[in-house]
Image: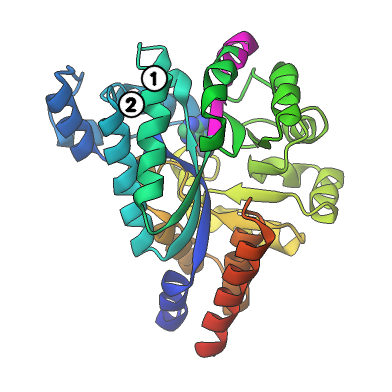
Amino acid sequence: MNDQLLRLVQAMPKAELHIHIEGSLEPELIFALAQRNGVKLAYGSVEELRRAYAFTDLQSFLDIYYAGASVLLHEQDFYDMTAAYLQRAQQDNVRHAEIFFDPQTHTARGVPFEAVISGIHRACQDSPVSATLIMCFLRHLPEEDAMATLEMALPFRDKFIGVGLDSSELGHPPEKFARVYERCRSLGLHLVAHAGEEGPPEYIRNALDVLKVERIDHGVRCLEDAELTARLARERIALTVCPLSNVKLRVFDEIGGHNLLALLDAGLTVTINSDDPAYFGGYLNENYDAVFRALPLTRFHAQQLARDSFNASFLDSGAKARLLAEVDAFFAEHA
Ligand code: HPA
Ligand code: ZN
């Protein structure tokens, strides 16, 4: 692999569209917040916690991810977590981030919705990186809980741009959330959903047909269905792919076996993302680095991935045009 290409990939301007902010909580910050808030953890040290990050599938990760989030109590905690992520993203030349947050993980513990969204939103406002918020519903909980969360969120409608669907995928198909997505659509919110990470291609199809999502989070299992793959390409539905996450959660055995290049060769709009960087071994540039080392990707792929990270974003057309021009100028300058 040529170092020049790896450096180019690190330095190019890019967007991140699939990052769970609770998944950016580093063990050191978990312990600092636990101490600040008097929360007792089931792990004795940072090292012991890190050793528990040996996941076998999505659920084994989620159990630890929700335990880590239990230290978040006050608005300032949410602010500190988000500020730390955005600072790290800036180092990776992230120009724009669309950040997921999971309010139900916090409101179920008695944390006010306002503390969650205000802390995260204030950190976004204070950052030089452009950042917007996507509120996720936990799919292992009933649709009524999602609907109640949406109602709780409405007084803060100006602080988030869309909704998503995350947590345990298998057994919780998109159609379980048909009514709450219909309501979100009528409110003019952007719609995305995790589908086809562990779930079958049918979940991707139903996310499109029933929930009417504009992007698919993960979606890597689409290649099992040629007709669906052709449709995703034709309709330019972007997939927010998370390479290191897919290896840690055993969607693929190793990074060299990831289907990213096959997705690109099928004509799909693909973006690279970190998912839960504190848990999966790397932030955005580490995800790019891993796939550029392991797969025969070229500078043309790099430019396409950078462009599509902005194309697939929910930025307005003016901001998109400016950032696409920035990408093209960067590649022209580094010919
Ligand atoms: N999949 C589903 N739910 C999640 C994830 C994920 O990768 N990360 C945080 N919540
Ligand atoms: Zn995710």
Dot 1 and dot 2 residues touching (CB under 8 Å): yes
Q: Is residue 19 visible?
A: yes
State the image quarter where residue 302 is shown: bottom right
User: Is 237 inside the magenta-drawn segment?
Assistant: no
- Residue 253 is left or right of residue 271, and the answer is left
Q: x%, y% of residue 148?
A: 57, 12
- Residue 87 is left or right of residue 311, and the answer is left
Up-down relation of residue 23 to residue 131 (above or below): above
Spatial CA distance of label 1 from label 2 is: 8 Å
Callout 2 amino acid: Ala
Q: Residue under circle 2?
A: 69
Q: Residue under circle 1?
A: 106
State the image quarter where residue 191 is shown: top right
Quadrant of the rendering where the C terminus is positioned: bottom right
Q: x%, y% of residue 132?
A: 51, 45
Q: x%, y% of residue 287?
A: 45, 57
Q: Judge depth for marks 1 and 2 and give the one in front.
A: 1
Give the magenta-colored segment's residue range: 135-147
- Residue 73 is left or right of residue 193, and the answer is left
Q: Is residue 25 visible?
A: no
Mark 1 Cα-neighbour bin, 10 Å: few <14, some 14–19, many ≥20: many
Secondary structure of residue under mark 2? helix
Q: From the Cβ of disc 2, is ligand 1 less than 8 Å away?
A: no
Callout 1 amino acid: His
State the image quarter where residue 114 is shown: top left
User: In this orientation, which residue lies closer to the viewer: 100 or 322?
Assistant: 322
